[in-house]
Image (cartoon, rainbow, N blue to C red):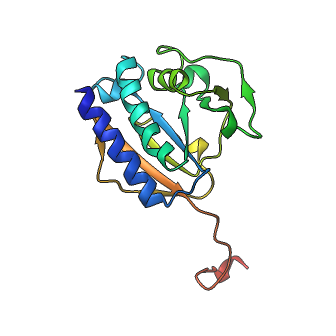
Amino acid sequence: MLGDIALAARKAAQELFEKANLLPGQTVIVGCSTSEIAGHKIGTDSNIEIGFAVFDSIHEVLSEHNVFVAAQCCEHLNRAIVIERKAARGFEIVNAVPKPNAGGAFASAAYSALKDPILIESVIADAGLDIGGTLIGMHLRRVAVPLRLEMARIGLAAVTAARTRPPLIGGSRAVYDEKLF
């Protein structure tokens, strides 16, 4: 089971990397409910082994491309972010350490696996993976664009992905409602 979960996470990360056209130095926010992966209601059955299987797989893929992984904690830590210190330039550091039942198993695994982990209050990520309905949108750069991945599930959890792009203002594709002026 853990092998299948790790493989699915690896495939989702690789597909996100390719479809989002990520560049070295960019950041991917990942929210992950290990409870949902195991078929339980979010927040009810935190599983550190699943957390490591998913984090290690995603981190391995994105690190190969010099893309940072930002791991979203659960609501008990106000959805704070676990990230490498060198990727946290300009963000507010918070004083906490995630645990499986207070921050989540995925965030706990990230904190244990990263070389120099810190928690920051929020991040402005270039792309994201939401595994199990963890609501990562608050940590995505404007404007978020949904991506449809072939890897639609990891375990029993639904996977939602997004990339971001700069806002499009004006130009030949802009449509104006003349009634408003």
Q: Residue at x 42, y 21 (%)?
A: 43
Is residue 15 visible in the rendered image? The answer is: yes
Q: How many marks?
A: 0
The picture places residue 95, in percent across and down from the top left corner, at: 71, 18
The picture places residue 49, in percent across and down from the top left corner, at: 35, 20
Question: Which of the pair 72/181 is nearer the observer?
Answer: 72
To which quarter of the image does residue 6 belong? Answer: top left
Q: Residue at x 63, y 71 (%)?
A: 168
Is 43 displayed left or right of 27 in the figure?
left
The picture places residue 80, in percent across and down from the top left corner, at: 62, 29
The picture places residue 90, in percent across and down from the top left corner, at: 77, 40
Residue 17 against residue 116 in the figure, above or below = below
Q: Residue at x 75, y 32 (%)?
A: 92
Is 130 displayed left or right of 176 in the figure?
left
Q: Quadrant of the C terminus?
A: bottom right
Residue 74 against residue 155 in the figure, above or below = above
Q: Residue at x 30, y 23 (%)?
A: 40
Is residue 155 visible in the rendered image? The answer is: no
Q: Quadrant of the N terminus?
A: top left
To which quarter of the image does residue 61 belong? Answer: top left
Which residue appears farthest toward the bottom when viewing the image?
172
Is 107 displayed left or right of 142 in the figure?
left
